[in-house]
Image (spheres, grey):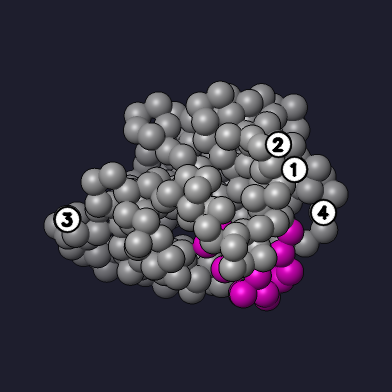
């Protein structure tokens, strides 16, 4: 989708979603570039929010779009949160947004993306996160998906690189695909992050997971520990992270 500028290695442009005409999208982009207030505040934690946008993902995409504003709001007292959206879909389309610090901006971006059939491109997402972190600090990333159709060893090699850079992976799986579960767990382990499964249509469950990851991105382990005092989702992720830093 043209709303999202190409960033990072291997990120390819896509087509405008059917619900938006080219003129409308261009006008939106021109307006967005003029709004400096949406940029993350200096010193805000940075989280890459990566989603599988292949055809099976539309219900969860819509749910994530509705919830992401609460993810931002939860981190306001911790100094704020900068988020970059990354997604893949269709025939080799894998794209990322600029960094934003306003949930309304991210909602606008996500609302212009429709899910399309295609294979997973998790390796390209991990490579992009690595390259982005070499330009500026990234503390963590969230990945939400339901499948894995790539070489697991290749993904684990990339995850190892992210672990060396200190980037924690929060891998959230919808459904019960065994290959995805195995790969997601290993990516989380190699980065010192966490893996969790959520149920289709469970907005509250996904929100708890997103808030926990956002707390870590905004305030580190100490912030996640504070959240874990009151929320079970944060406790589960923190327990899985164990003594890893």
Q: Residue under label 4, please give it.
A: 177
The residue located at (33%, 69%) in the rendering is 104
Residue 36 circle label: 3
Q: Main secondary structure of the magenta part?
A: helix
**Circle 2 residue:** 189
Q: Residues within 10 Å of mark 2 (few under 14, many from 20)?
A: many
SS state under label 4:
loop
The residues tagged by marks 4 and 1 sit, at their Cα atoms, a distance apart of 12 Å
**Membership of 219 in magenta stretch:** no
* Whether residue 209 can be seen here: no
Disc 2 to disc 1, C-alpha distance: 6 Å
Query: Could you tell me which quadrant the N terminus lies in?
Result: bottom left
Secondary structure under badge 1? helix
Work out whether mark 3 precedes mark 2 in sequence or the reverse, and give the earlier one. Answer: 3
Are the two marked residues, 3 and 4, in contact with CB atoms closer than 8 angstroms? no
Q: Which residues are magenta?
A: 197-212
Asked where in the image residue 208 lies, by quadrant, the reply is bottom right
Are the residues flagged by discs 2 and 1 in contact, CB closer than 8 Å?
Answer: yes
């Amino acid at each position: 989708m043209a709303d999202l500028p190409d960033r990072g290695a291997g990120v390819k442009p896509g087509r405008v979603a059917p619900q938006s005409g080219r003129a409308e999208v261009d006008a939106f982009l021109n307006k967005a570039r003029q709004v400096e207030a949406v940029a993350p505040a200096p010193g805000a934690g940075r989280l890459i929010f990566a989603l599988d946008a292949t055809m099976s993902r539309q219900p969860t995409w819509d749910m994530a779009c509705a919830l992401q504003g609460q993810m931002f709001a939860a981190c306001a007292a911790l100094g704020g949160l900068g988020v970059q959206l990354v997604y893949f879909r269709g025939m080799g389309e894998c794209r990322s947004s600029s960094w934003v610090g306003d949930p309304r901006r991210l909602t606008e971006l996500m609302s212009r993306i429709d899910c399309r059939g295609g294979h997973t491109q998790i390796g390209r997402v991990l490579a992009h996160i690595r390259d982005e972190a070499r330009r500026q600090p990234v503390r963590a990333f969230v990945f939400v998906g339901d499948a894995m159709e790539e070489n697991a060893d290749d993904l684990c090699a990339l995850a190892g690189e992210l672990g060396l850079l200190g980037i924690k992976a929060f891998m959230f799986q919808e459904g019960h695909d065994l290959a995805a579960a195995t790969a997601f767990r290993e990516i989380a382990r190699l980065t010192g992050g966490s893996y969790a499964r959520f149920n289709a249509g469970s907005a509250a469950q996904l929100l708890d997971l997103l808030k926990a990851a956002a707390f870590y991105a905004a305030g580190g382990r100490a912030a996640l520990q504070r959240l874990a005092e009151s929320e079970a989702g944060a406790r589960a992720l923190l327990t899985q992270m164990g003594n890893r830093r």
